């Protein structure tokens, strides 16, 4: 159980690092929704949420076996 938690933490750190590098170099997920006006900006990371959900579902699937 301890190894699984460490592995999951490492995977989350790697995903976060990739997302931060993507933002730094201007790579954006095309499924993320952003609307901006003069006084209001709305951002909903739909594509990122789907990607994280798929990765976590796969990890849970492989660790349950």
Image (spheres, rainbow, N blue to C red):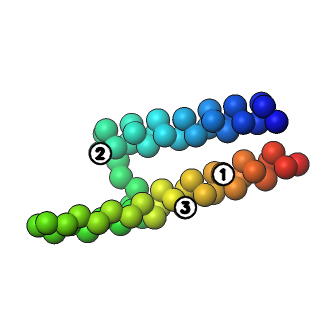
State the residue position of label 1.
56
Seen as rendered, the residue at the extreme right is 65
State the residue position of label 3.
50
Q: Quadrant of residue 54?
A: bottom right
Q: Position of residue 27 (x, y in %)?
A: 35, 47
Seen as rendered, the residue at the extreme left is 38
State the residue position of label 2.
26
Picture layout, residue 28 above or below residue 18: below
Foreground mark, 3 or 2? Answer: 3
Q: Position of residue 31 (x, y in %)?
A: 42, 64
* Labelled pair 1, 2 in contact (Cβ < 8 Å): no
Who's the residue at 49% across and 40% down the image? 16
Query: Label 3 vs label 2: CA separation?
Result: 20 Å
Picture layout, residue 2 above or below residue 27: above
Q: Position of residue 24 (x, y in %)?
A: 31, 38
Mark 3 and mark 2 lie on one chain; the one further toward the N terminus is: 2
Identify the secondary structure beneath mark 3.
helix
Picture layout, residue 13 above or below residue 29: above
Foreground mark, 1 or 2? Answer: 1
């Amino acid at each position: 159980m301890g190894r699984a938690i460490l592995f999951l933490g490492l995977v989350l750190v790697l995903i976060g690092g990739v997302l931060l590098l993507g933002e730094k170099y201007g790579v954006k997920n095309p499924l993320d929704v952003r609307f901006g006006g003069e006084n209001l900006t709305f951002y909903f990371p739909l594509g990122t949420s789907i990607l994280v959900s798929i990765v976590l579902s796969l990890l849970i699937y492989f660790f349950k076996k």
